[in-house]
Every structure is written in C-alpha cells, then in structure tokens.
Image: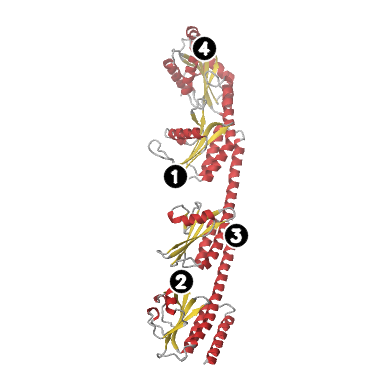
Amino acid sequence: MNNQIMQWLAEIKLLFFSCLETDGGELKYEKVVKLLLEEMKDFLGAKEASFYKLNPWKQELFLDITTNQNLHFLEVSSFSKKEVEEIFDNKVYIYGNAGIDAFKEYDLLISLRTTDQIYGILALKEDDQTFLISDVSIISVISVELSKLIQVAINMSKIVAEEQRYRQLYRVTEKFHSSMNMDDVLGEIIYTLREVYPSFTYFLLLSHDNNNHSNLPIKDLEYDSENIAAMQAYVTGTSQFEDSKSEKKSVLYAPLKGKQGVYGVLQVISPNTLMFPKNEVEFITLLANTAGSALENAQLYYQSKRLITDLQLINETSHRLNSNLRLSETMNYMRDQISKSFDAQEVGFIMYTAENEVKVLPGSSKFFENEQSKSYIHYIKERINQGGEALFLGDLPIYLENRKKYHSIMAVPMVQSEDIKGFAIVMHQDAYHFSFDMFKLLQSLIHHSTLALTNSILREELEKMVVTDHLTKLFSRSYLDQKLTESLKTEHEGTFVLIDIDNFKDVNDTYGHQIGDEILVQVSNIIRSNIRVTDIGCRWGGEELAIYLPKVSIGMGQLIAERIREKIEMQTRPQVTISCGISYWNMSKEDNVHALFKRADIALYEAKSSGKNKVLLESNWRSAPL
C-alpha cells in the first residue's frame, strides 16, 4: 500500500509539473487544483471531492473548487477559521459521521496545513458508502503531500497575480506620465482599481475643488467625525486604516502624495472584511504614490501655464496702460480685461477725492452709475479704510438695502506712495464664484496698474488745468480756438455764441469784486448745465463768455442761447442779465475762425446797444432756420 501511495503521489507531481509546460510556463491555478481533486477522487474511490480554502482577509473557509458540476458556489456556506480549528482539534483528518453540521454532507475531511496553521480542507463524499482505500492512516501521508502541492499552486498563483498587478502599475505609470490632464490621471486610478479589485469600492477625496470630473467617484476632503482617518492620511502623508466590525468592512486611506505635498486621499473599502488585507496595502499605496506624483506634475503644469497666462495679462496690461492712452480708454481697457479674465459681471474703479469722497471713474460698469451701487461702495470703502488690505468675499456677509444682489466680491486698494488713492471692485451674483488664484492675480494686476492709472488721471487733470479757466471752470479761449478750427475742417456746420454780462461794472462797484467773481461762477454753472458734453463753453475775457455748438444750426443755437439768457435772469443772485451775439457757419461757403468771431462780436454790440438782455443773430441770418 505504501508503494501504491508513493507511486500515485509521483504521478500526481508529474501531472502538476506537466501543467506548467502545457500552459507555456504560466500556472493555471484552478486547472491544477481541479486536476488534483479528480485524481484524489479516483484514487480513493470517492463520489465527489471539494477544496475549501482559507480567505485570510475574512478569516473564513469558503468553497474554492469542486468536482461536482451541479454545486453552486453561492449556495455553499463559509466557515470561520476558528470553527475549523475546533473541528479538527489537532487532528489531520476526520472520517465518518462526526456529527459536524457544517460538513454533514461529507464523509471524509482532510486538513491541508502549512507549518503553523490550516489553510484549507479537502472534503470527500463516499461512493457506494465506502472508500476503496482500507487503511485510512495513509490519508495522513496524502494530507502532507497534497498540502505541499496545493500550497505551491497557491503561492505560484499569488506570484502570477502579483506580476499582473505590477504590470498594471507599470502600464498606469506610463499613462500617468504621458498625460498632463488631471481628469485623465484620476480616471486611470479608478480604472486600475476596478481591474485589480472588482469587489472593492473606491472614492477620491480631493483637497482642491477640481471641476468636471464626469462620473468619477470624487468627494470633497472635509474634516468631520466620519473622516478623521482620511484627514490623518492627508496631514501625515501615511496610510491609515479604519476597521468596522459592525458594518463588516475595512477601509484603507492612502494619501495621493507628491514631492511637494499631498493632493488628496484614495479611499478603498474592502467589504465583508474585518481587517484590510496587508498584502494588498503595498500595491494600493504604490498606486496612490504614483498617482500623487502624476497629479503633482499635472498641477504644476497647469499652474505654470496659468502663471504664463497671468504674466502675459499683467505685461500686456502694463504695456497698454503706459502707452499714454486717454483716461477713458485706459479704464475701458482695464474693465474689458478684468471682465474677460475673471468672468466678472460688474467692474468698478473708485477714486478718492481731496475731500475723501468717492468718485466713480469712467469705464466702470453701468451698475456703478446707479444708486444701488452706493451701498456696496460705502461698505467696501469702510472695510478697506479699516484694514488697508484687499478684500476677498465669497459670500457677502451683510444685507445691503435688504437684499444681496452680488455675493462674490473682490476689492483691491490702489496704493501709491503708501497712500490709498481708491480701489478696484469686481463682483458676481453667484456665491464663491471667484477663486483665490483669481484674487491674487487681481491684486498683482491692480498693483502694477495703479501708477499708470494715477498718472493718467493726473495727466488729464493737468491738461484740464491748462485749458480751463481757474475761476469759472469753463474752457480757456485758446482751447475753444483749437476745437473750433478742427470743427471747421471736419464737420458740416456749427454755431458760435458770444456772451457779455450786462452792467457788470456796476455789480463790482455795488457789491465788490468778490461778489462779481461769484456772479461769474453762477453764470458759468448755468451755461455748463445747459449745453452738451460735446459743446464748448469758455471764458472769453473779463465778463465775456462764449459757447461753441458743433453740428448745431443757427436756429437751434438761438433757442439754446435764449434758454440760457432766461435762466441767468431767473437764477442769479444778485440778479444779472446777459446779451448774446450769434454767428454761424456751414460748408456751403468758405469761412474762418476770425470771421466767425467778428460777426458774433458785431451782433453782440448791436444787442447791447439796443437795450441789452437779448439775443441777436449776425446780420446775414436775421431769420433763423431751425
């Protein structure tokens, strides 16, 4: 019998190694074990042979392979390792009905062991109620030899599986480093895990808000009672475990770690497991580390591209602002750049006056022309004056005028020579619309632009001082001469009005020169409020003033002059009146500035000579067409 068993074992080993050759050197674990079971069944004359294998993750034995084609694996219960150890109680095999409910269908149970523990059971059913072998003690020899062969098969299958996993890791590493797209990297992590561990559940807990990851299982990394282990993995950069006996699951938190930091945490949930399998931790950790490096590279690539774009924006803006643009052109350009770069709904530029009031610069959004904007401007001004720092508000914390139209606000002070000259304000209706990177870029943009903006404002103020009369704030005569000369060359008609304050010498003699100056200011203010922005009011000299109305007919010019004359008579205190002489030109005949002035002067002389407080037209236009 010993010779028979030895010969049979030799044949079994030969078959075992022949499997390696026929499969090209790759071990087919299921095929080898199935072959051993068939040989065992035939040798012992059994009806059925089944192999129950220890699952080290769950510490349970489950049906792994059987010769019974009709047996459904899902219908077979698993048995805890503790139960199996109690059943055998240091016995190699159990023969006959031992009253064991768990294995009551079987007649012979053979333990398969390593040096220190049971790793499986070979369960057999008798055929015709008896085995062919009479000396069951030989089963001890079978147990030892089969334990070795099946253990070799298990170990080799692990090596094959490990090789496949690391091939996956190599493949995914190549994929990681061939892409600079963060979505591709994250998607490849999930794809690899699904390939290697189809029964696990996975989540990516990311530390940054990354948009549009299609259907990837991504969660925000938040600090709460349920995510303490995740936060520890993120903060410490080491893998953390969370085992739950009540929920029968084990969770691994592997940090997505690069050289410069941790970019998130990979959460892997192993169901029906009391302790996460240690032999899987290394692979998942390596995958997470590789993914962390790839995420870092993708993020650095994205940041470098964004930095280049930001620098180009700042450089282009600074170049344009330093190219001596008019203030309106400068502010319009700044508004357009900020609106486009930050996806802003409203952009405003607010400057402080000498009286510490606020002035909305041209180029600001139309919203800042409305009354509703004042509450926002006042709130931002108070906050900036208190701290002197830029403001980044994701959700405006106060209700302005009982409602918040704009929730997201960025406001950056314009500082020159350590003095706050004003601030730029950028707004959007949605809460948390602007990112912190946008805020930093806006700060840099305003910092580099402030000097150019203030220089542009000062330049225009200086130009205005040069062409503006200091007392009346009307334009100077030289400025009117220049604009009228240009109008004669480029436009088709225009009306000139020469004005003299009646009896102005009597006002000075009666009330004094200070009151005389106040009268000049009153008259000038009335003129300015009754003409268009494109019209030119100027101080002609002494108490004489003038208005040039480009593209205006003589009839319409007469109506405007009459309206101004009436309002001056009604609104000045002490009351004064004016006399007006009007001249006109059009393209139908040749004309010049000097002739236009002379005709208006003659008409003014006639108005004053004929009773004052009236408007007269030049002699060629006694009947004024509209």
Query: In this orientation, which residue lies closer to the viewer: 162 or 400?
Result: 162
Residue 539, label in figure: none
Crowding near pointer 2: few (<14 within 10 Å), some, many (20+)?
A: some
Crowding near pointer 4: few (<14 within 10 Å), some, many (20+)?
A: some
Crowding near pointer 3: few (<14 within 10 Å), some, many (20+)?
A: some
Residue indicated by mark 3 = 177
Give percent across and percent down for residue 211: 49, 53
Give the spatial CA distance, label 2 vs label 1.
51 Å
Number of residue marks: 4
Give percent across and percent down for residue 393: 47, 41
- Between disc 2 and disc 1, the foreground one is 2
Residue indicated by mark 1 = 431
Residue 59, label in figure: 2
SS category of the residue bearing label 3:
helix
SS category of the residue bearing label 1:
loop
Q: Relative to residue 261, is residue 393 depicted above or below?
A: above
Give the spatial CA distance, label 3 vs label 2.
39 Å
Query: In this orientation, which residue lies closer to the viewer: 265 or 333?
Result: 265
Give the spatial CA distance, label 2 vs label 4.
118 Å
Say whether marks 2 and 1 touch (CB < 8 Å): no
> Furthest residue to the front?
90
Q: Amino acid at mark 2?
A: Gln
Q: Amino acid at mark 1?
A: Ala
Give percent across and percent down for residue 463: 59, 26
Q: Residue at x 57, y 55 (%)?
A: 296
Q: Is residue 169 visible?
A: yes
Give the spatial CA distance, label 3 vs label 4.
89 Å
Q: Amino acid at mark 4?
A: Tyr
